[in-house]
Amino acid sequence: MIIQENIPLAAYTTFKIGGPARFFCVALNERDLLEAVKFAKGKGLPIFILGGGSNILISDDGFSGLVIKVELKGIIYRELDHGAVAVSASAGEIWDDLVGETVSRGLYGLENLSAIPGTVGASPVQNIGAYGVEVSNSIESIRILDIEQMKVVELSNPDFHFTYRDSLFKREKGRYIIVGVNFELGKKGKLNTDYKDIQEYFFQKSVLEPTLSEVRQAIMEIRSKKLPDWKKWGTAGSFFKNPIVSVERWHELKNKYPDMPHFVEPDDRIKVALGWILDKLCDAKGLVMGNVGTYENQALVIIAKPGATAKEVIDFSRELIKRVKDKTGIDIEGEVEWVC
Ligand code: EPU
């Protein structure tokens, strides 16, 4: 494995922004990962794990440690006794290729997570979710390299404490590198089409009982309308998390803004739609400041023109944070990871 120096990182991210990595390498297998980690430890350098680069914003000054680009490949399917299939996917596989492959094999579980950019290894970190489904619903276990102990172990789903856009990987940042993810998918399953956008899509097409592949198709079309063209714009999708508030706080907000869309969380707190707040209360849909703005069809998504800097994105995000605070009193949090 070759360790390179001063490698520009912008092209490795969907924001297409950011300075160079002091050191950079590509890991093709577990041995490469161990070697890379040893190198960084030996020099006392921080490590950043790069997957598809679709949920990060890299500082204009770059990253002063070692960037390890994870390119471990391979997907294995194994029939289980109870009519399910175990799917083990290596961290460097492209997420949507995995979803497409499982759907074409007639396996249920990942279809609502269609057309999300990034890699398999990144999917559990922020527990990617869309249209009422989170990746943690289908994860059985995850194979990880524990950097502290320098050994590869497999932990099961509950060990990762998955919640909305959160997991152990975020709470113990830098300790683990994901090597592969083991899913359990059904040969039969119940499709989750409750989400408003999906209902409307099938209603318009007069489809009463959509099939597994029709649900994937629907989601690919819905997402392509709601999210910007990744090839044209720099973006990382939703820039902030939808805020979760207490029931008391929710009642106050609801009295003031009765139309605010909301979802009840498993712990009974209320998740409110920040896209709606930015759009309807903060007048921020399609707002542009220099090279950066919010997407005209979805205010939660920040887009950047070619040539935009990380500083411009951060300044713009601060403006949005301020507007939301002024209107609702809510402190919003980034969904995109800041790398510096
Ligand atoms: N809305 C507006 N104006 C906007 C944006 C949204 O009024 O500019 C309203 C919508 O009409 C809807 C509500 O706000 O009533 C929620 O919007 P939407 O359904 O588009 O979903 P979201 O909450 O903005 C989340 C995820 C997306 C995921 C969608 C669909 C987060 C941070 N984002 O967005 O994930 O695709 O739900 O399930 O949870 C991502 O993480 O990068 C991402 C794109």
Image (cartoon, rainbow, N blue to C red):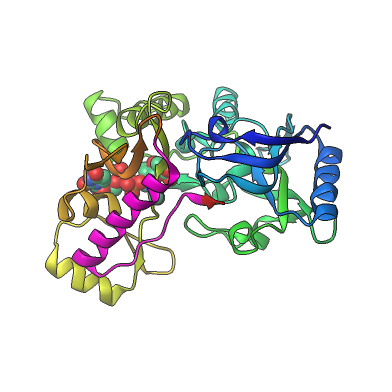
Q: Residue 23 location in percent, x, y? A: 72, 41
Of residues 292 and 334, which is closer to you in this image? Answer: 292
Assign the N terminus to one quadrant of the image.
top right
- Location of residue 62 (image quadrant): top right
Say if the magenta span includes residue 271: no
Query: Which secondary structure dominates the residues rendered in magenta?
Result: helix
Of residues 6 and 250, which is closer to you in this image? Answer: 6
Say if the magenta span includes residue 320: yes
Q: Residue 68 location in percent, x, y? A: 71, 41
- Location of residue 321 (image quadrant): bottom left
Which quadrant contains ligand 1? top left
- Location of residue 331 (image quadrant): bottom left
Q: Is residue 271 left or right of residue 68?
A: left
Q: Compared with residue 45, is residue 107 higher up or lower down, i.e. above or below?
A: above
Q: Residue at x 25, y 23 (%)?
A: 205
Q: State whether residue 312 appears in this view.
A: yes
Q: State whether residue 184 appears in this view.
A: no
Q: Is residue 200 left or right of residue 169?
A: left
Of residues 193 and 181, which is closer to you in this image? Answer: 181
In the picture as drawn, the residue positioned furthest to the bottom comes out as 248
In this picture, which residue range is highlighted in magenta?
Answer: 308-337
Q: Compared with residue 258, is residue 124 higher up or lower down, i.e. above or below?
A: above
Q: Residue at x 39, y 62 (%)?
A: 265
Q: Residue 10 location in percent, x, y? A: 53, 34
Q: Residue 302 location in percent, x, y? A: 34, 42
